[in-house]
Amino acid sequence: MRGGEKVLEALCDIFPTADIYTHVCDLGAISDALKAHRIQTTFIGALPYARKMYKRYLPLMPMALEQIDLGAYDLVISSESGPAKGIIPTSPALHICYCHSPMRYIWNMYNKYYDSSGLMTRLMMPPMAHYLRTWDVATANRVDDFVANSTTVAQRIRSYYRRDASVIHPPVDTAAFRPVPASELGDHYLMVGELVSYKRPDLAVEAFNRLKAKLVVIGGGEMLEHLRKIAGPTVTVLGSQPFDVLKHHYARCKALVFPGEEDFGIVPVEAMASGRPVVAFGRGGATETVVADKTGVFFKNQTIEDLMDAVQRMERLDFNPADAVLRAAEFRREVFTNRFRTFIERATGTELAVPA
């Protein structure tokens, strides 16, 4: 249940009787709200080890999507950061794509994925990416309206597909977080997220090693053991943690450190909902959520020196937790559902019923 699933859950609030199509589904990992819907998987869900190794089946996904029979529907919404928009709706149906990002691994982050891959993957990536790019651009014409989760993603849609997109930021469960009294604040900074190379957790660890300042890292992923090896005495790498532990650290950290470039980035909003400021790389979705010199500070380059300088500027920031909480409230779930419902009504010319 990550960001994409939370968007799907919010879409189900708007369409409580909708059917869900997906390549792979782990019923034990999704919410009861999603399980209440009819969920149908493609043939990929029946392939060996599909739940854990679904990414390996990416070359088969275009074929699987095009086999889905959508003849019974007059409205189709694809929610994707992969190839989901490649479905073939019937000609009278309206197809709206909520795009978290065009496929990063074949577009804006291709070289980063390539450089961090093993030998066999590097051999396969160039021909596979070429095929997927051609298919991805062609299937953009199967979409009637694009909705992007950020202005950053809308710009990518324009660059790669030559299509315009409306922007509706994704839902964040801001009500699940709250500030604590100043007397409960700790003396550590916090980094949260999947520990993968493009999120640059190594940058945070190295910067705090040099600063000799306290940093707590929460998250799992392929870089977990590497980060534990390079962490100095002031850096604690906790790995994956229960939600209650995450909330505790959000509310009590001096600030969140967000060193990667994200399409939107829910983590900074959760930190602000907890009443804490953010030190963020000044590109991507964080620039649309964090208010410079009010709810956080930005650094320009992904270097240890720039991040260290930003942390030192954060120490001098005249920060009011109430400003962060108010900013985070602009991204709460009801805002998303209201805006998306209005978008659908305008696109279809039909007023939707509001679920009880």
Image: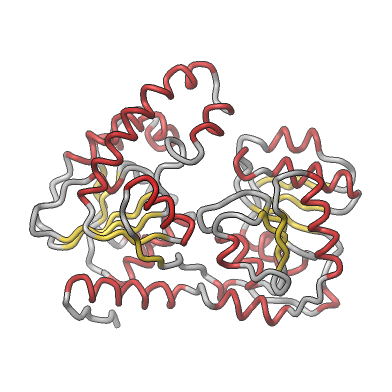
Decide if residue 66 is on the left or right side of residue 36. Answer: left
Q: Position of residue 280 (x, y in %)?
A: 68, 58
Q: Residue at x 72, y 55 (%)?
A: 299
Of 188 and 139, nearer the camera is: 139
Q: How many marks?
A: 0
Of 111 and 98, nearer the camera is: 111
Q: Position of residue 159 (x, y in %)?
A: 39, 48
Q: Colour scheme in the image? A: secondary structure
Decide if residue 56 is on the left or right side of residue 77. Answer: right
Q: Position of residue 323 (x, y in %)?
A: 68, 80
Quarter of the C terminus within the rendering: bottom left
Q: Quadrant of residue 220?
A: top right
Of 21 and 31, nearer the camera is: 21
Q: Residue at x 37, y 34 (%)?
A: 50
In the image, residue 221 sits, relative to residue 96, either above or below, namely: above
In the image, residue 50 sits, relative to residue 199, either above or below, namely: above
Q: Residue at x 72, y 40 (%)?
A: 202
Decide if residue 21 is on the left or right side of residue 107. Answer: left
Q: Quadrant of residue 135?
A: top left
In the image, residue 195 sits, relative to residue 282, either above or below, namely: above
Q: Position of residue 62 (x, y in %)?
A: 26, 36
Q: Residue at x 73, y 50 (%)?
A: 217
